[in-house]
Image (cartoon, rainbow, N blue to C red):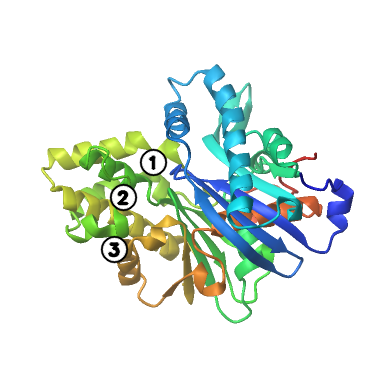
Amino acid sequence: MNKKYSIEQLARKKQLRVCGLMSGTSVDGIDAAIVDISDSSADVVTFDTYPFPVQVREAIFDIFQNQAARIEDICHLNFVIGEVFADSVIKLCKNKNVPIDSIDLIGSHGQTVFHNPKGRKFGKRLIRSTLQIGEPSVIAQRTGITTVADFRPGDMAAGGQGAPLVPFADYFLFRDKVHCRTIQNIGGIANVTYLPANCTLQNVIAFDTGPGNMIIDHLISRITKGKQKYDKSGKMAAQGGVNKKLLGQLLEHPFFRRKPPKTTGREEFGSQFSDMFFQKALEQKIPNEDILATATALTAETIARAYRRFLPAMPDEMLLCGGGYRNKTLVKMLQEKLRDVKILTTGDFGINPDAKEAVSFAVLAYAAIKSRPNNVPGATGAEKGLILGKIVPV
């Protein structure tokens, strides 16, 4: 097992080897990235994605249907996912020939099962809340590695929305003295980080733009009766045309007009919204290919509108990451709507687009163990910079 460094010893090391773990709203699998991080650099050693066992993925989606979720199931699943996350670290090290005892630290996002940035009244107070499961104590004990997890609650306790969290890592990894950049993640939900040229952390703007792949994935699963989980390369959408009437109706959702800081998730754009979308399409007798084209256009249009409405200026470069970068139809739509923006991927700058979110949580864990604030108050709305993440030593 891993050599046990104390928290104080880890904080003093000039370079840490950190394994970042991420599972997003699409629940595609666990992204695991091993990264060598110092104060001035982050070098990805290796990366892979490990699918959830089928029964675990199904159990997660059962929990998403929160009216039917039982507390004993959530409690059980918290520890089950901890075991699965730990297994992903062990498998990655074994499969990629990386000694597990070379890893100093794990940074785990966990699996979000509920996120309520709007808050709910408790007496006269408005209380924001969030829940990520994947018990870090299990990860630490199974791997023998100090684990940092549960990053969102600290920001929310300070009046923030607990998201987006990755802007701190985006600033660390991709800021540039000359070029103005956006880091555009398109996972289940799409979010943007705006990095002006030669920016400081105080200049960073970040927020969720709306749905990413979530609605597209849900619709193609319904259309194909579960045979396809996603529209590979956007092929089905490419065969259809955008239904402007339906798109216009969908764009009326109040989230798109809301000013940042803002965050969203399955609570607004999950199965209920997607089923409403599908029902409207059926009522209007829209062909399946047009349904997918319209869903893809919704993601592209809401990203483009967010740039025009909420960013101080258009970026020189957009760096794509998350599964959406593989959707050629979506990327084409984005380029048509943002003609003066050069569209690249984070891979053009040394960070695999599939690995980028996992790398980000490795960076957040590194900052936490060094006792450095790792949120961006301008992005989340928190009252101040905070050290996010709960540290579980071994």
Q: Is residue 361 left or right of residue 25?
A: right
Kindly give the residue lying farthest to the left in the view shown.
Answer: 285
Question: Looking at the image, which is closer to me, 385 or 56?
Answer: 56
Q: Residue at x 27, y 38 (%)?
A: 226
Q: Which mark is residue 101?
A: none
Camera sees residue 130: no
Residue type at mark 3? Answer: Thr
Coordinates of residue 28 in the picture (x, y in percent): 44, 45
Q: Quadrant of residue 284?
A: top left
Residue type at mark 2? Answer: Leu
The residue identified by callout 1 is: 269
Q: Judge depth for marks 2 and 3 and give the one in front.
A: 3
Mark before the other along the chain sequence, 2 or 3: 2
Q: Is residue 57 above or below residue 183?
A: above
Mark before the other along the chain sequence, 3 or 1: 1
Coordinates of residue 108 in the picture (x, y in percent): 64, 45
The residue identified by callout 2 is: 251
